[in-house]
Image (cartoon, rainbow, N blue to C red):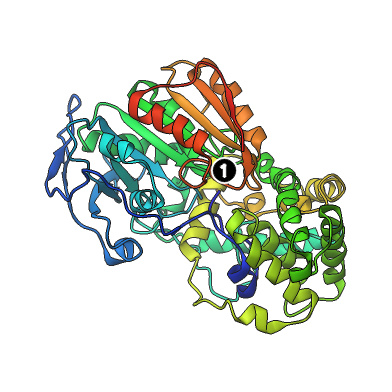
Amino acid sequence: MKRGRAHRPPAARRAAGRRAAGLGVALAVVGAVLVPGTSTATPERGTTPERVTWSGCPAETTAKFPLVPLQCARVPVPLDYGKPGGATIDIMVSRLVSSSPARRGVLLTNPGGPGAAGLSMPAELATLGMPASVLNRYDVVGMDPRGVGLSAPVSCGFAQGQAYAGNIPPYPADAAAVTRWAGVVKGVADQCATNDHDDRLRFMSTANTARDMDTIRAALGEEKLSYFGGSYGTALGAAYASLFPQRTDRVVLDSNSGDTVLTRESQRRFGLGAEQRFPDFAKFAANRSTAYGLGRTPAEVRRNFLRFAEQLETEPVLGYDGATFRIAVFAGIYADQDFPKTAQLWQSLKDHQPNLLSSKAETPSPYDNSMSAYLAVVCNDSAWPRDLAAYQRDVKDARQRYPLFGAAGANITPCAFWHHAPAEPPVKISQKGPANILILQNLRDPATPHVGGVLLRKAFGDRARLVSVDQGGHGAYVYSSNACVLNVATAFLVDGKRPRHDLRCDA
């Protein structure tokens, strides 16, 4: 999930980490040049091919990576694929063009979410060091999925200061806290329904986004589509590879939820993911006990974390209670490079030093669109339980099994009160199709634990191979420094060399 917003106050948002970005890696785009022009889709019977006209990208897309020559275009798609002749919306796409004679086709990308904008992802990948051999092999294509960013954005009307501040629930202290939170999220579900003036929210789904991907493929004049998706992008890629197996070329799925949709079960795995990832952070903090004072051994760091989080539940410090402290630390262990500021946040709260918080201040940004899109997709994709008592039981169990963060993942969400039932069942993963899927999975991923990769590998059968990477964090290919997984995934994308068997990449 990249990238779904967490429920935390502004100070916690500032302390929370994100997946690696802007590492200062030199831009290596061999043969990638700005080539204005158009693409024409291969027409299907009874249809007129759409014409895609490329031009410069909006400033908000290019601002972060100004040296990367991205182009952008709009592709019209049906709002409702059940009525293909009805209303349409425009999907904004971007591309980083390869001028190499070795060009194979397009590599569509998705960063996760749902709700994450993806227009700048090709530029981000190039800047982070995606191998030149891959950039030569493909036009790398990004997109703002339907309802997100510049693609007919949806809105629930979220305002800053609203109690619901993100899509990862707070850690409830007891059953009464679940009841109180149920009142908040019911109001959110009602708010989304009230603000859906153009009726777009109900057509937000993983299946429809996968259909948009195929419309984009046709509009680009490509017979097949290669794909690289991370986090929730793995669910989207799995859906596309199941709906359109013969139109897939090479598919890389990185940091996997385990299915074609995000379900309550995948949300509950946050607890498992935190337990598997936290030891990496605890070791970091223990090795620097003099600097941070969080504990002299990893075991002591863990004990101190649980003790301090419980203390904050009744004695908040500097605006942080137990729930907001837990979510800040959870978000701050996504990537190793975020460990220092996560430890500093904890230290500042422990020592009552607000100056350490304010020193990291950032300009607040509105998250209405990303939060709204996340809820629409997740709640429309599958039916969630509506029984409050079931959530209370699950929270109690999770507090015992996964004390670091389990109760947050088990907490109730707006999906329990969503106004629309799913329009169709989740896409069923298909084992019928080409053996062209490579699944990448870190062993210690807080957001999408390793079991998600195992489940997806089993579901796809011989269509897929699993590469397990002995490292922590969210994101394996390009977003980490592991040479083994970089080489394996690159060889697959460039030459189609897929491992004969599942394999493990050592640290």
Residue at point 56% right, 64% down?
191
> What is the quadrant of the C terminus in the image?
top right
Residue 84 in the image: x percent, y percent?
Answer: 30, 37
* Helix, strand or loop status at disc 1: loop
Can you identify the residue that label 1 sits on?
421
Q: Residue at x 25, y 29 (%)?
A: 104
Compared with 294, 96 (above or below) is above
Does residue 107 show up? yes
Q: Is residue 426 visible?
A: no
Q: Tell me what residue is drawn at x 27 percent, y 60 percent.
A: 67
Q: How many marks?
A: 1
Residue closer to the observer: 312 or 82: 312
* Amino acid bearing label 1: Ala
Task: Give the left or right position of residue 344, taking residue 104 as reference.
Answer: right
Q: Is residue 476 left or right of residue 67?
A: right
Q: Quadrant of residue 330?
A: bottom right
Tell me: 327 left or right of 217. Answer: right
Image location of residue 217, percent across then percent down: 28, 35
Residue 415, how many percent across, how many down?
62, 50
Report the residue at 42% width, 17% height from top.
433
- In the image, 390 versus 226, the foreground residue is 226
- Compared to residue 228, the image places residue 342 above or below, namely below
Question: For mark 1, does the 10 Å Cα neighbourhood hold few (<14), some (14 to 19), or many (20 or more) residues?
Answer: some
Q: Quadrant of residue 300?
A: bottom right
Name the spot of residue 459 as percent of width and height, x first. Answer: 58, 23
